Image: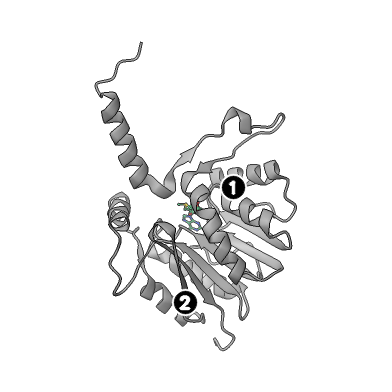
Amino acid sequence: MSFSIFSRSQKRRARTVFLFLADERVYRKPKKSDIQPGMTDHRRYSASAARNRDPILEVLRGELPSSGLVLEVASGTGEHVVHFAQRNPDIIFQPSDPSTEALQSIASWTEATGLKNIRPPIRLDVLEQDWPVQSVDAVFCCNMIHIAPWEACRGLIAGAGRIMGSPSPLIFYGPFLRAGVETAPGNRAFDLDLRQRNPDWGIRHLDAVSKLAAEAGFSEPVVTEMPANNLCVCLRRQSAHG
Ligand SMILES: C[S@@+](CC[C@H](N)C(=O)[O-])C[C@H]1O[C@@H](n2cnc3c(N)ncnc32)[C@H](O)[C@@H]1O
């Protein structure tokens, strides 16, 4: 018999607070019904990816080329890449992540969906100089730059600049701080939580990201407001960069 000092309602309240604070980090294990016979299933699930994948898809449709190779940085569970690949059959997607668990999850999602326009996931840490991909037609990255040191944002922009020509897009999705726009209470709490977990993490200022990108040869950002106080930010590689 199990014994707990917390009442049911206390547990429910604690879980609600945890889900709110954890937000982008809510993973659940696969259900038995998800697992196909003979498959070693490493699929992870993100509640937020299930919520935001359609609004992100809408933005990507307007920004991605109609064909070519598209790199996803920080693919996480792999749910985004399978969703986008299913709906863009003429694009080849290259998922990536530095985490072994993420790479396994992405591979399992790809296998489970049987999609042929997703390349096997590659280990890519944006902090490293040498990226295991030489040339792509677009890069997108969801929910990474606030859950990593500022150097990761710098590395992502520099790396994307190295492997893309003009006018290829670099697309960010996630929360941002904006000059002259009041930060939503949910984002303020999320920022505080991130900084408490790691002082080098935190929601980034859009102006700081844009400045870095301009220095690396990218255009002014095109900003799309997204549900839950997130943004999509699209920067295009410019040819004039020396
Ligand atoms: C919050 S998850 C986002 C996953 C997915 N893009 C999404 O939106 O559901 C953050 C991801 O960033 C990845 N990440 C952290 N540091 C990184 C780095 N230096 N280079 C590339 N990816 C990184 C983590 O491994 C993790 O998969």
Q: Can I make out residue 59 in this image?
A: yes
User: In which quadrant will I find the C terminus?
Assistant: bottom right
Mark nearest the camera among 1 and 2 is 2
Other residues around mark 1 within 10 Å, as few (<14) / some (14–19) / many (≥20):
many
Residue 146 - label? none
User: In which quadrant will I find the N terminus?
Assistant: top left
Rounded to the nearest angstrom, the CA distance separating label 1 from label 2 is 30 Å
Other residues around mark 2 within 10 Å, as few (<14) / some (14–19) / many (≥20):
many
The answer to whether 209 appears left or right of 120 in the picture is left
The answer to whether 198 appears left or right of 113 in the picture is left
Q: Nearer the viewer, residue 61 or 178?
A: 61
Residue under label 2 = 221
Which mark is first along the chain, 2 or 1?
1
The answer to whether 86 appears left or right of 185 in the picture is right
Q: Secondary structure at mark 1?
A: helix
Residue under label 1 = 103
